[in-house]
Image (spheres, grey):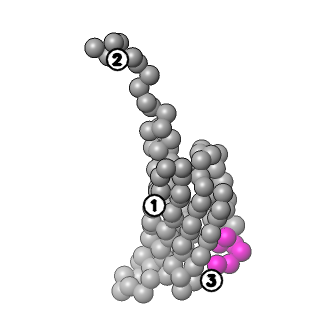
Amino acid sequence: MNLTISGHHLEITPAIRSHVETKLDRMKRNFDGVIEITVLLAVDNISDKEKRQRAEINLKLSGKTLHAESTGQDIYAAIDTLMDKVDRQLVKAKEKNRSHSRESIKGAL
């Protein structure tokens, strides 16, 4: 699994990097098929000072790509919200893979 953490108008400090990595450990427990993870952390220059911090993630799975983004006052809050969103997406993708019907055609009629 490749992990890329980059910043746009933001320096990635070791504390931010470790926060992202600890949050990603939760996803590694739920889903093994992650090939590549790209995290983009940014500070937007918008007039609304409430939500200037933005976090995005792209997960490349076998056969799929998941994308989620989140904004917040604090970069850590944006990361936490982002990880909750992507965790829900991963659980849904995992359920979709597992929930194929196992009944025969005769049994369905």
Front one among 74 and 109:
109
Compared with residue 44, is residue 40 higher up or lower down, i.e. above or below?
Answer: above
- Magenta span: 11-17
Q: Position of residue 11 (x, y in %)?
A: 62, 83
- Residue matched to label 1: 67
Q: Splitting the image into 4 quarters, where does residue 29 fall? A: top right
* Residue shown at 40% from the left, 18% from the top: 103
Q: Is residue 101 visible?
A: yes
> The N terminus appears in which quarter of the rendering?
bottom right
Residue 14 on the magenta span: yes
Marks 2, 1: nearer the viewer: 2
* Residue shown at 47% from the left, 74% from the top: 54
- Real-space Cα distance between discs 2 and 1? 36 Å
Q: Position of residue 36 (x, y in %)?
A: 59, 60
Compared with residue 24, is residue 11 higher up or lower down, i.e. above or below?
Answer: below
- Residue matched to label 2: 105
Marks 3, 2: nearer the viewer: 2
Residue type beneath disc 2: Ile
Q: Is residue 11 left or right of residue 73?
A: right
Compared with residue 22, is residue 97 higher up or lower down, i.e. above or below?
Answer: above
Q: Splitting the image into 4 quarters, where does residue 14 fall? A: bottom right
> The C terminus appears in which quarter of the rendering?
top left
Per the image, label 3 sits on a secondary structure element best described as: loop
Dot 3 or dot 2: first in sequence order is 3
Task: Please tell me the numbered disc located at residue 11.
Answer: 3
